[in-house]
Image (cartoon, coloured by chain):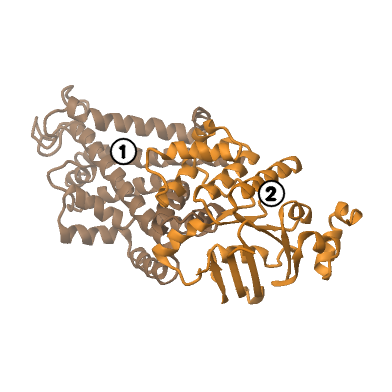
Chain colours: A brown, B orange
Amino acid sequence: MREFAARFIRSPEGVAGLVLTTCLLAMALSAPYLFPRDPLSIVGRPLLAPFADPAFPLGTDRLGRDVLAGLMHGARTSLLVGISAAVVAILAGAIVGTLAGFSSGWFDEALMRVVDAFQIVPGFLLALAFVSVMGASLPLIVLAIALGAWTGPARLARAEVLSIRERDYVAAAWVIGMHPLEIAFKEVLPNALPPVLALVSVIVAGAVLTEAALSFLGLGDPNIVTWGSMIAEGRNVLRTAPFLSIVPGLGLVAMVLGVYLLGEGLVEALARRRIRQ
Amino acid sequence: MTALVLKAEGLSKTFRSHGRIVKALDNVSLALGRGETLGLAGPSGSGKSTFARVVLRLIAPDSGRVEIDGEDWLALGGRRLRARRRHVQMVFQDPLSAFNPRATVGGVLSDPLRIHALATRNERPHLVDELLERVGLSPELARRAIHEISGGQRQRVAIARALATRPSLIVLDEAVSALDVSLRGRILELLAGIQKAEGISYIFVSHDLAAVRIISHRVAIMDEGRIVETGPTESVISNPQSATAQTLVESVPKLALRPE
């Protein structure tokens, strides 16, 4: 573990990603303490420019809501949605991929055609359709995003399982009379997981962007402040007060970049270990 | 001769890969009595591993019949097959790949006890210790991970795993081929000792007649999916009839020099 940390420190992108995500995580976690009031409440004069009033360092929007409070609380939503969607997508993908790869035959075929069906529809359109039909609450948005993201993990898990199920220790599990489901989920799945986990960062980054896009189109949860809804709100006064769109936009860039770089660093550190083995 | 543990009749299996047809088993019949060891020797690709895997129900034959303890082994399925699997166990060639890389020694040995309900949860650690002692290992190893112990220790754990379900037949598929020479002798002694004490039957699959000779009562020589010669170990080795057996005997210099 210590050795792993040492290898991770040596990759500059990994460290940059770690710093960025740590800052954003700190923002997200401290938001309710630093800004205990609802970030959607009106607190000052509308359209105050940044750095003009020490009480509102990043200014206020058209309705006089604190931009900094929105930014901090928005980080919370972004991270929560991004991580939850990735967890749901990886979990669903790993289970479907393992069942498909382990069973083979018609069951495998059927499951993989379902994966195909999901994969040919663009993920964002799928999320858009799902949210407009089912309504916009946070759990449904997470589900909508996961719906378009679980196929990658499913394919990867299946490919891994196809190679692992031929190993001797799987034959040994059959020989001692283990139930096929126990073999699939206890002997095979845990060993198929590492390459699938490498997808986490890509999925989190994608989910953050999809969530922002949904909010921008007004399909997000209206009771929660998100960066996407802040950008949409600022769009109306883009010429007179561009900072209203730029500030949450920068947050989005930092989040996606940070998560992606962190993932790159982790994967690289893991790969170096595998080469040495 | 006591009752037969294994009776295989007319087993055939053909593999098709990339348009090529390989006859791995061609009308193979073998029988094995209680407490007996059958050496199954032959060059690589002769079908001996396929035979072992058919007997273990890891692959299905195209035709033929297998009886284990007098019961039609190929007709079993599902829950009944899983329950009966405890009578036929296996030790693999590579002691590392035969274990889940995440497993611990204790976990590996308590799995069969749990699956076949041979011990309650509280009794299991005690039985695991006992199994380790029977194969000459310290019970303290139970807490170690599989990747932390040596190759020789791993193969002993593999034998302990096979013994856990108190089987009537253990298939040893090149079980000592991956070990160095000094370890090989000790593992073979261990296997012979266990057989004497418990009357377990072995099928000892190997390409190495020197190892086969130490442990087997009878040998069957396979080539291209067929049994080309079978008989008591000493007579086959001292007076091989088939060309395949002659080549195998000649490939072990010591055996050829001392024909008695």
Amino acid under label 1?
Leu
Relative to A31, say whether A242 is above or below: below
Instruction: Kindly give the residue lying farthest to the front in the view shown.
Output: B1
Rendered location of residue A120, percent (x, y): 36, 66
Q: Say if mark 1 contacts mark 2, CB within 8 Å.
A: no
Q: Nearer the viewer, residue B194 or A111?
A: B194
A148 sits to left or right of B216: left
* Residue on which the image places disc 1: A250
Tell me the SS state at disc 1: helix
The answer, for residue A140, to whether it is visible in the render is yes
Badge 2 amino acid? Val
Count neighbours of disc 2 (C-alpha within 10 A) and say few if under 14, some if 14 to 19, many if 20 or more.
many
Q: Residues within 10 Å of mark 1 (few under 14, many from 20)?
A: few
> Residue at position x 21%, y 39% from top?
A244
Q: Considering the numbered disc 2 on the image, is that residue within a helix, a strand or a loop? A: loop
Q: Callout 2: residue from which chain?
A: B
Nearer mark to the viewer, of 1 and 2: 2
> To which chain does the residue with label 1 belong?
A
Q: Would you say B131 lies left or right of A49 here?
A: right
Residue extending farthest top: A54
**Residue located beneath label 2 in the image:** B176
| Discs 1 and 2 carry the same chain letter | no
Quarter-of-image position of residue A249: top left
* Point 66% across, 51% down: residue: B175
Q: Residue A83 at x, y = what percent?
A: 31, 43
